[in-house]
Amino acid sequence: MKKTRSVLTASPEYRQFIVDLKSRVLSARISAARAVNRDLILLYWDIGRGIVEKQQALGWGESVVEMVAADLRRAFPQMTGFSPRNVWDMRRLYATYTAPEFLAQAVRGNDRGIPNPILRQAVAKLGGDKKRPIGAAKFPEPKGMEFLPQLVAEIPWGHHRLILDKIAAPAALLYYLRATAQFGWSRNVLLNQIKAGAYERAVTEKKTHNFPLALPEYLAEQAEETLKSSYNLEFLGIRREVLERELEDRLIERLRDFILELGYGFCFVGRQHRLTLGKKEYFIDLLFYHRFLKALVAFELKACSFEPEHAGKMDFYLNLLNDKERAPEDNPSIGIILCAEKDDIEVEYALKTKRNPIGVAEYRLQSKLPVELKGKLPTARQLSDAVRAALPAPKVFSH
């Protein structure tokens, strides 16, 4: 006997069936959009490659870019994307990512020799797929660099243009390519990460920790890559001094943004995570698990300058975590102390005798003044004095 529509829609099995179908449709749409993006980027890559190689082989000048754009618009009037600027960007895409400096950086992974998982993944993909990208037979890639189109195709065109407009250094280019592909950054998030100096804070700026003393070499390198020199918490919207508990509350409210700032692989476990020893209780401000380090990561928030006793307290917490909650297959737990300010020498001495891996980083609630403007803008005191001087003198009344 057939069931009526009202009976079916009221059925929990039918409702779950529709939920599953919606999920499948959404997944298919996302996959289709990614496939379209990959084909589009590979097309742009081949157009840029063709222009560059013809210029090199036949001595064509820069005017060929405008000619190509005009001819493609005439041939495909229904297609967008063949404006002169866009075709120039196609040429720039290929020329930038096949420049010797970038290729050397890509093969090396980064300037510290850490392997690049995205590149390995791209090579593996290409090895399992013998199909050549569009136009590859006509314009073969440099030997050993066949993975490049696959790597570049992971990222939408608008993201590429943003990266190429904002970034010049090969190591920074590679960092933002990898991060965008790994984290799935939107264009706005990518722009904010560039403006906040994510590459500098993750790679080039000095980091303070004792990882080489407390971890095996291979794990110390991975942990060092995970740590940032400072953490940008502007997304909290705080413009004043704040208590530690309020800072913790705001971070929990904006947990997604905080995890985005921490980086790839962090999984939230809990706040004020309870540990016991005998009859006493202890609480870790924020506890995470890192999927790739395979380690618990404890965060302590300090709304003040770093003090040596902070390292001792964290070392104690890590001992408890390792003894009571670390799984047999996990690596040693890691501690990160987030503080308003730190003195690197003081941190170095405080961590020298600690046997657990601990990193210390500053957090920023507001953007720092650009280096080129330091000393050129008036201080708050100078502004206040200038305002007072500009005010008319008070009138004096006599009786």
Image (cartoon, rainbow, N blue to C red):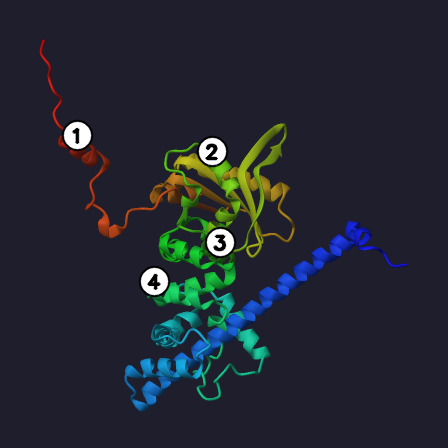
Mark 1 highlights which residue?
Answer: 388
Label 3 packing within 10 angstroms: few (<14), some (14-19), many (20+): some
Dot 2 surroundings within 10 Å: few (below 14), some, or many (20 or more)? few
Kindly report the distance in space between the C-alpha atoms of the residues bearing marks 1 and 4: 41 Å
Judge by depth and name the residue closer to the eye, 183 or 15: 15
**Residue that numbered label 4 is attached to:** 166
Q: CA distance from mark 1 to mark 2?
A: 35 Å
Report the residue that reaches farthest toward the bottom: 58
Above/below status of 204 relative to 50: above
Labels 4, 2: front one = 4
Q: Are marks 3 and 1 in contact (CB under 8 Å)?
A: no
Determine which residue is flagged by label 3. Answer: 263
Q: Secondary structure at mark 3?
A: loop
Label 4 to label 2: alpha-carbon separation: 35 Å
Residue 246's disc number: 2
**Three-letter amino acid code at disc 1?**
Arg
Q: Which element type, helix, strand or loop, lies under badge 2?
A: helix
Q: CA distance from mark 3 to mark 1?
A: 47 Å
Q: Quadrant of the C terminus?
A: top left
Residue 197: x and y in percent read 36, 54
| The image quarter in which residue 225 lies | bottom left
Residue 167 visible within the image: no
